Image: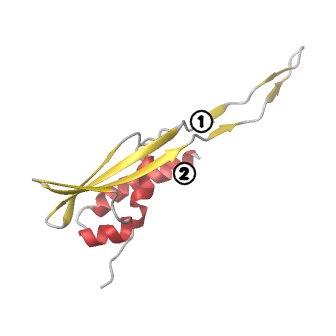
Amino acid sequence: MAACAVHDADQAEEGKSVIVGMSKTEVRMCAGFPTKTLSDDKGEIWSYERVITGGRSIALPTVPIPTPTSIMLPGPQFSQGSGAYCHAQVRFKKDHVVEVAYAGATDMMGASDAACGQIVQGCIGYRPPM
């Protein structure tokens, strides 16, 4: 599970740089339609949301410790927590992305912005038809 979180965090980081410069049409094609939009004096912002509910945990088996009383110690436990969420904001100026930012409880298993990776994964390697 930790490897998956690291992979998602890598995608989130790469996705930020890949999306900058894309047109609105290209972003819709690779990331889908936004959850929310907002227009302000600096352009337009599209928001994409991803919520991960319910924690996952891994418990390793009980380990016997050879002692005169033969005690059993529980194995280590790892927990992902109760969930994570990402609000990915994409700012457009003159129909092209100028900024991408992530907000929310985006870290998973110690990997920064891992909850955002799947929002942008379709844009990594996306090439619009000629």
The image's colour scheme reads: secondary structure
Residue 29, quarter of picture: bottom left
Q: Quadrant of the C terminus?
A: bottom left
Q: Secondary structure at mark 1?
A: strand
Say whether residue 115 is visible: yes
Residue indicated by mark 1? 79
Inter-mark Cα distance, 2 to 1: 14 Å
> Which amino acid type is shown beneath numbered disc 1?
Ser
Q: Is residue 62 left or right of residue 55?
A: right
Q: Is disc 2 surrounded by few (<14), some (14 to 19) or many (20+) residues within 10 Å?
A: few
Snapshot quadrant of residue 106: top left
Q: Could you say where residue 80 lies in the image, as x and y percent from the top left? A: 56, 38
| Residue pointed to by mark 2 | 4
Up the image or down, 91 lies above or below 73; here it is below
Please identify the residue farthest to the top as the structure is shown.
68
Where does residue 117 sit, x and y in percent of width and height? 43, 54
**Does residue 39 sit above or below 125 in this rendering?**
above
Is 6 left or right of 1, judged from the image as shown?
Answer: left
Residue in view at x 31 percent, y 63 percent: 18
Q: Residue at x 44, y 48 (%)?
A: 115
Residue 21: assigned label: none
Residue at 54% in and 36% down: 81
Going by the numbered disc 2, the residue's amino acid type is Cys
Q: Nearer the viewer, residue 50 or 11?
A: 50
Residue at horizontal 25%, vertical 67%?
22
- Residue 42: quadrant of the picture: bottom left
Specify the farthest residue to the left: 41
